[in-house]
Image: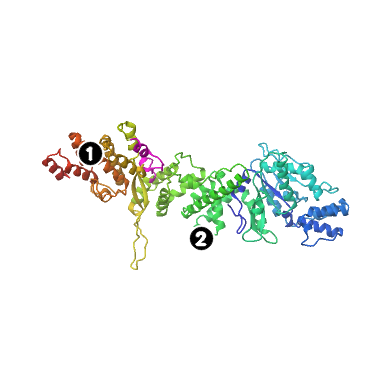
């Protein structure tokens, strides 16, 4: 959410975006003209009492709760014309400062079709005077003759609406001034109530210059409720916002939300400068949104967020990640800065996503309580870039997320990015396919990556099944298989289920890394880090259904067909084991002279010292079961299998072949010696 000035109010993202979409109506009250020299509504009442010689009620009198009734009493004691003459004279004073009016006019200018739409309950003509320095003459409507507030494609409504009437030179009896006038406008004739009900249904309304207890605000919110209760309208109400002076550090939004208003709190001062300056700065920023956004990002984003004023960091986030309808403009500017912004901005983006989720949960809860439609879930950049493994849709990235991939790939030589990606993998996420593609492209362009980084990113950005971590499932193939072992165990589908659960893939864990120490034992920068993969990450081979492999082994053990079943798939099991070792070789942890089986599988033959903490080693158990069956039923097949294992250039297979050689009765002593001498 942006702050347009330092220490100013936080303007909600949705409100800013709705304004760009021509969906926001500025609804202006007496407060906006106070800076130009006019009184508040209560101040106008006091002026009328003083001018007409009526005693002014005390400051704490209950009469001030209903200033419109006070004016009604005044008109009952004096002629209505006299009261309205005093009002006209006071509100016709030349303005001192029209900057706020000019800025509201600029913000009310329609982006897509030209023209202006705004509403005021003020009687003065300051908007007409202000528009002379802003735009061509803007037409106006004055209550009770009002346009239909319709948000249609032809933009039939383009005007300044004086909802309660506009000052004229001669007769001002049409002004909605007293409680009787309000009653006609909102209750009996109800022309203002109908206008407001339609307005709330069609637009996002922003109230400026009102207080919570302002009679105007009370009448409008009550009128909308009355219209719906009387079934004179079926309109659902859009969100409405109100600028509110904050008297304390922890203002209570509840009274506003009870009236379906979302408060935007600003620091209270006598001249309301934080409101005025925010609106002025907002209008200035909107005049050339793209240029202003780019300039702000270029000025602030090169600095780490922790070193910035929170409002500045929030503004960058809003410009980069908070405007989904800007088609990624802010994110592209961010990604193309001469020096790539620091990766800690990714933390800020994640925090922004969490805030959106929390806000949506609150809105959904409120909507549910009020029997309103649940608002759509927000689009989260983190979920786009790092979708859950269980989400296989891989929709195309939004323009903003796609632009951010160009920033992230500039950090491929950063240990920080490696660690963040490993963290995402650990939380069941993967990289979006367009993100993976961007990494592969950057690898081709960037020839200076160290070997450790290069191996890591090649694995992470690969598209094969071996590079995609298994998605968590409650019941996978092993569950089906373990429930289905019967005398018909050789059915082809059962073999396929078991083999599907044994597919090896590669994933990564945080590295066990200790930086070099100086003479005093303090860590020092490691200029060599990244030359080897194990300095960055620990590679781990996992099976697609390894969380359920214990149930498979349990279902097999003791069954009369356990050996024959494993023998029927022993060629495929051998291939699975070789694939697992090939993955270790890919990350530099396996080769002709060494592989992880040496320490992860101490005994090739099933033994109590085999803890099987790494589930891929369970392949040895299945292979051994199958070979034992073959060795007892088909001597030629057993010998061929042993010869094949010896030909695979990994210690694991040589160990497997030697274990089988030492136990088979189908090889002569000289054949066994020949195998030993050739190992």
Observer-nearest of 76 and 629 = 629
Residue 140 lies, in percent from the top left, at 75, 44
Whether residue 138 is in magenta: the answer is no
* Image spot of residue 397 (x, y percent): 49, 42
> What is the x, y in percent for residue 591?
26, 47
Compared with 511, 202 (above or below) is above
The residue indicated by pointer 2 is 307
Q: Residue furthest left?
A: 670
> Is 566 placed above or below 428 here?
above
Distance of label 1 from label 2 (alpha carbons) = 64 Å
Of tags 1 and 2, the one toward the viewer is: 1
Residue 451 in the image: state x and y as whole percent. Answer: 33, 50
- Residue at the spot 11% in from the left edge and 42% down from the top edge: 669
| Residue 246 located left or right of residue 566 | right
Which segment is the magenta one? 460-484
- Residue at the spot of label 1: 627
């Amino acid at each position: 959410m942006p702050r347009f000035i330092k220490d100013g109010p936080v303007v909600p993202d949705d409100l800013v975006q709705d304004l760009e979409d021509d969906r926001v109506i500025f609804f202006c009250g007496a407060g906006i003209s106070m800076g130009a020299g006019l009184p508040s509504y209560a101040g106008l009442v006091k002026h009328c009492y003083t001018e007409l010689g009526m005693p002014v009620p005390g400051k704490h009198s209950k009469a001030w709760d209903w200033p419109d009734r006070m004016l009604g009493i005044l008109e009952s004691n004096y002629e209505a014309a006299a009261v309205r003459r005093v009002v006209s004279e006071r509100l016709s004073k030349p303005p001192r400062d029209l900057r706020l009016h000019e800025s509201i006019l600029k913000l009310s200018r329609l982006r897509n079709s030209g023209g202006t739409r705004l509403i005021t309950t003020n009687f003065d003509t300051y908007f007409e005077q202000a528009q002379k320095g802003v735009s061509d003459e803007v037409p106006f409507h004055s209550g009770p003759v009002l346009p239909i507030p319709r948000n249609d494609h032809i933009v039939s409504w383009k005007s300044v609406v004086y909802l309660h009437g506009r000052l004229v030179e001669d007769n001002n009896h049409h002004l909605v001034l007293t409680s009787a006038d309000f009653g006609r406008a909102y209750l009996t004739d109800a022309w203002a109530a109908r206008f407001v009900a339609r307005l709330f249904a069609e637009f996002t309304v922003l109230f400026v210059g009102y207080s919570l207890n302002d009679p105007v605000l009370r009448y409008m919110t009550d009128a909308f409720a009355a219209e719906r209760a009387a079934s004179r309208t079926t309109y659902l109400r859009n969100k409405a916002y109100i600028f509110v002076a904050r008297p304390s550090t922890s203002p209570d939004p509840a009274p506003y939300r009870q009236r379906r208003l979302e408060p935007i709190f600003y620091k209270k001062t006598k001249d309301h400068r934080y409101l005025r300056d925010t609106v002025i700065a907002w209008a200035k920023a909107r005049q050339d949104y793209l240029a202003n956004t780019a300039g702000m990002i270029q000025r602030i984003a090169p600095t780490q967020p922790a070193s910035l004023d929170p409002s500045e960091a929030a503004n960058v986030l809003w410009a980069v990640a908070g405007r989904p309808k800007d088609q990624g403009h802010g994110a592209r500017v961010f990604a193309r800065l001469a020096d790539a912004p620091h990766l800690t901005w990714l933390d800020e983006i994640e925090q922004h996503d969490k805030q959106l989720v929390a806000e949506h949960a609150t809105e959904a809860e409120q909507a549910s309580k009020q029997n309103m439609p649940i608002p759509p879930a927000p689009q989260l950049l983190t979920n786009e870039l790092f979708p859950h493994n269980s989400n296989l849709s891989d929709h195309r990235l939004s323009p903003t997320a796609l632009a951010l991939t160009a920033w992230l790939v500039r950090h491929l030589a950063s240990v920080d990015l490696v660690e963040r990606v490993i963290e995402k993998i650990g939380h069941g996420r993967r990289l979006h396919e367009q993100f993976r593609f961007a990494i592969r492209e950057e690898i081709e362009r960037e020839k200076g990556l160290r070997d450790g980084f290069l191996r890591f990113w090649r694995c992470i950005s690969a598209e094969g099944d071996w590079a995609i971590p298994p998605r968590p499932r409650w019941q996978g193939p092993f569950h089906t298989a373990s429930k289905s072992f019967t005398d018909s165990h050789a059915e082809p589908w059962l073999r396929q289920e078991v083999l599907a659960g044994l597919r090896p893939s590669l994933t990564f864990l945080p590295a066990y890394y200790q930086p070099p120490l100086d003479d005093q034992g303090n860590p020092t920068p490691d200029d060599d880090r990244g030359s080897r993969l194990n300095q960055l990450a620990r590679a781990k081979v996992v099976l697609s259904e390894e969380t359920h492999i214990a149930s498979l082994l349990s279902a097999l053990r003791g069954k009369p067909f356990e050996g024959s079943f494993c023998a029927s798939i022993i060629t495929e099991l051998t291939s699975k084991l070789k694939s697992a070792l090939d993955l270790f070789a890919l990350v530099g942890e396996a080769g002709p002279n060494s592989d992880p089986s040496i320490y992860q599988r101490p005994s090739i033959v099933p033994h109590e010292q085999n803890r099987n903490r790494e589930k891929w080693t369970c392949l040895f158990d299945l292979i051994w079961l199958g070979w034992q069956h073959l060795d007892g039923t088909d001597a030629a097949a057993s010998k061929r299998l042993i010869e094949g294992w010896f030909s695979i250039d990994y210690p694991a297979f040589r160990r497997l072949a030697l274990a089988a050689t030492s136990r088979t009765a189908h090889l002569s002593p000289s054949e066994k010696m020949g195998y030993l001498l050739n190992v």
